[in-house]
Image (cartoon, helix red, strand yellow):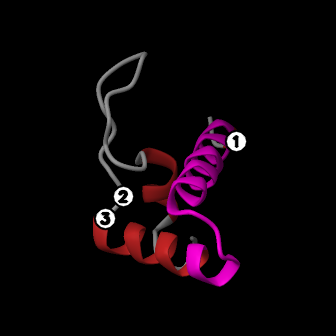
């Protein structure tokens, strides 16, 4: 993900720009790049798109917590 998104985007953006439970919504990651990486990972490892999105969302949360 580091090659498609800047470190700033990875720490400050959410997957799809949804509202948060503790404040204003974060901007979403760029849709074209986000969808491209999800498609490539899903096809490479023969996994459903939903599973890849959940894993990616979890990685973004952990990364955000590490940089607090």
49 versus 20 height, above or below: below
Q: Are marks 2 and 3 in contact (CB under 8 Å)?
A: yes
| SS label for mark 3 | loop
Q: Position of residue 5 (x, y in %)?
A: 46, 69
Question: Distance between the Cα atoms at labels 1 and 2?
Answer: 19 Å
| SS label for mark 2 | loop
Residue 43 falls left or right of residue 5: right
The residue at the point 37 percent across, 74 percent down is 33
Question: Main SS type for the magenta part?
Answer: helix
Q: Position of residue 50 (x, y in %)?
A: 52, 54
35 versus 25 height, above or below: below
Identify the disc placed on residue 66: 1
Image: magenta residue range: 42-65
Residue 14 falls left or right of residue 26: right
Q: Dot 3, how many residues are within 10 Å of its Cα: few (below 14), some (14-19), or many (20+)? A: some
The residue at the point 67 percent across, 42 percent down is 62
Residue wearing tag 2: 29
Identify the disc placed on residue 50: none
Q: Dot 2, how many residues are within 10 Å of its Cα: few (below 14), some (14-19), or many (20+)? A: some
Residue 14 falls left or right of residue 28: right
Residue in front for this viewpoint, 34 or 63: 34
Residue in front for this viewpoint, 45 or 27: 45
Task: Specify the farthest residue to the top.
Answer: 22
Q: Position of residue 3 (x, y in %)?
A: 54, 80
- N-terminal of the pair, mark 1 or mark 3, is 3
Residue wearing tag 3: 30
Give residue 24's quadrant in the image.
Answer: top left
Please identify, in this view, whether the residue under mark 1 or under mark 2 is nearer the observer.
2
38 versus 18 height, above or below: below
Question: Distance between the Cα atoms at labels 2 and 3?
Answer: 4 Å
């Amino acid at each position: 993900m580091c090659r498609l998104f800047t470190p700033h985007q990875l720490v400050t953006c959410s997957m799809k720009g949804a509202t948060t439970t503790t404040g204003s919504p974060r901007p979403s990651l760029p849709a074209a790049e986000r969808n491209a990486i999800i498609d490539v990972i899903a096809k490479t490892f023969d996994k459903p798109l939903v599973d890849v999105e959940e894993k990616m969302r979890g990685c973004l949360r952990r990364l955000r917590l590490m940089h607090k």
